[in-house]
Image: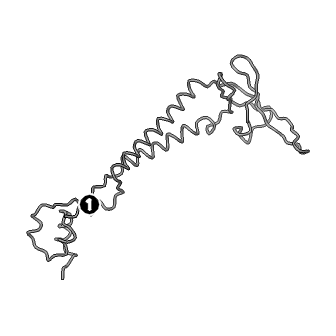
Amino acid sequence: MVNLNTSRHFDAVRQGASLAELTQPFSASRLDQPSTGLMLRPRDMNRFTLPEVIRLLLVALGVFSMAVGALLTIMFLISWRTSEGTVESSEEVVQGKTNLIRTVRYTRINAVQTFVPFAEETLPPTARPGDHVKVVYMPSSKSAVVYTFSSVWGVPASATALGLVLASLGLFTHRRDPVVEG
């Protein structure tokens, strides 16, 4: 009967002995022979490992996602302008029911007064008629939103955070060596 609890067997495992070699009666001469197979060492079994292709794919997707976040940030900083807007309210009758609609009026760079389309989606819930809010808009189009962190920086920040997570997973996981039985 083979005793697998001896320290010599654990030393044999560390040196790359295969399962077939471990189940044979133990001899000290086996420790001196070079191992033909690649095996995970017992101390490496606690670490999260991924195949190299998956690691490279995670790093590539992470870098791509961070680049998208950076590109969106640069595009915002270059092409969007800010203006001070005023919250207004109006009543709208739909199918016999009166709804109170909040809108935001602001002045564009060319002195034209206009409204933020779909202001309800980006207005803070605490905004009341007469409050002043910051509006960001594109001078070349009718796009405009009320400036909040989530409306302006939500997508770039999310893309960058996702990129950091993916790249970190790819970079900081250990490479999985192929196990070759020999």
Is 43 situated left or right of 54 in this image?
A: left
Q: Residue at x 58, y 36 (%)?
A: 153
Is 102 situated left or right of 109 in this image?
A: right
Q: Residue at x 38, y 50 (%)?
A: 54
At mark 1, the secondary structure is: loop
Q: 86 and 58: which one is in front? A: 58
Tell me residue 176's x, y (percent). Answer: 31, 55
Query: What residue would you read off at disc 1?
Result: 179
The N terminus lies in quadrant: bottom left
Q: Residue at x 40, y 45 (%)?
A: 57
Is 174 situated left or right of 88 in this image?
A: left
Tell me residue 27's x, y (percent). Answer: 10, 73
Tell me residue 162's x, y (percent). Answer: 49, 44
Quarter of the rendering containing residue 25:
bottom left
Q: 10 and 175: which one is in front? A: 175
Is 170 situated left or right of 110 in this image?
A: left
